[in-house]
Image (tube, helix red, strand yellow):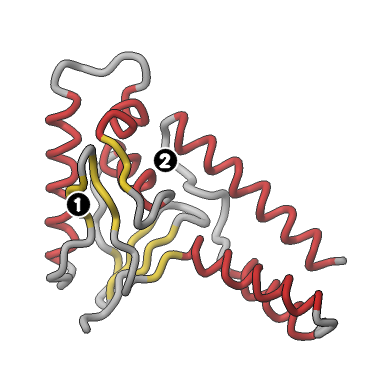
């Protein structure tokens, strides 16, 4: 098994490989990757990607431009030494395969779930440790610098989740 990529959305969008930062590209690439990372292992339609990037005013070439961005992201992952396909074509769009890679939002959810179980089982020191680990994953506002209504809505939802987790950790 090759080394996993580390995807970060709990702060500025980032992709890390063993030898450092993976170049993601410009604003369109970042918005498309963000939407795929917000929906790991689920197909995101090309129409949804077009809407996230251009809103109500997509150019006639929008679908082609999405395809070009996907190809560029795939190339960046290959340059980072990832031989397996991370982004696959899945009708009617694309799917990000998170299995075998690390995604901070999934790690956050798993740690919060572990903390909640520990609270129910009255293992408060374990709960505190899990909450602390979960909150340590945050590096700033979720998806900072990535635009698009769908991405910004999800970033607000994630921020609300972070604040709720902080409140639970204090309690």
Badge 2 element: loop
For the residue pair 116 and 68, the one nearer the viewer reads as: 116
Q: Is residue 12 above or below residue 156?
A: below
Q: CA distance from mark 1 to mark 2?
A: 16 Å
Residue 114 drawn at (x, y percent): 66, 75
Quarter holding the C terminus?
bottom right
Q: Are marks 1 and 2 in contact (CB under 8 Å)?
A: no
Q: How many marks?
A: 2
Vertical placement of residue 94 versus 82, above or below: above
Against 102, is 22 above or below? above
**Quadrant hosting residue 76:** bottom left
Which residue is depicted at the point 38% across and 52% down? 37
Residue sitting at the far front: 91
Q: Give the crowd class for mark 1: few <14, some 14-19, many >=20 residues within 10 Å.
A: many
Residue at left offset 40%, top offset 50%: 39
Residue 78 horizontal side relative to residue 26, left or right: left
| Image quadrant where one finds the N terminus | bottom left
Give the x, y percent position of residue 160: 67, 47
Foreground pick, 135 / 98: 98
Q: Nearer the viewer, residue 44 or 143?
A: 44
Which residue is label 2 attached to? Answer: 146
Q: Which residue is mark 1?
A: 73
Task: Name which residue lies at 34% across and 31% down.
Answer: 48
Q: Earlier in the sequence, mark 1 or mark 2?
A: 1
Camera-near label (1 vs 2) is 1
Q: Quadrant of residue 53?
A: top left
Q: Is residue 142 left or right of residue 127?
A: left
* Secondary element at image label 1: helix
Crowd around label 2: few <14 · some 14–19 · many ≥20 (10 Å): many
Residue at x 35%, y 51% (from the top left corner): 42
The percent coordinates of residue 149 (x first, y second) are 46, 29
């Amino acid at each position: 098994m090759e080394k996993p990529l580390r995807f970060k959305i709990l702060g500025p969008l980032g992709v890390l490989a063993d030898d450092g930062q993976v170049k993601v590209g410009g604003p369109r690439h970042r918005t498309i990757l963000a939407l795929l990372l917000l929906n790991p292992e689920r197909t995101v339609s090309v129409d949804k990607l077009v809407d996230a990037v251009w809103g109500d005013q997509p150019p006639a070439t929008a679908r082609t431009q999405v395809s070009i961005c996907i190809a560029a992201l795939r190339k960046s992952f290959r340059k980072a030494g990832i031989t397996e396909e991370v982004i696959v074509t899945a009708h009617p769009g694309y799917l990000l395969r998170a299995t075998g890679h690390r995604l901070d939002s999934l790690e956050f959810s798993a740690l919060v779930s572990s903390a909640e179980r520990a609270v129910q089982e009255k293992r408060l020191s374990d709960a505190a440790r899990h909450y602390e680990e979960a909150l340590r994953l945050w590096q700033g506002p979720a998806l900072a610098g990535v635009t698009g209504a769908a991405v910004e809505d999800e970033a607000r939802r994630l921020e609300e989740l972070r604040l709720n987790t902080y409140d639970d950790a204090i309690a």
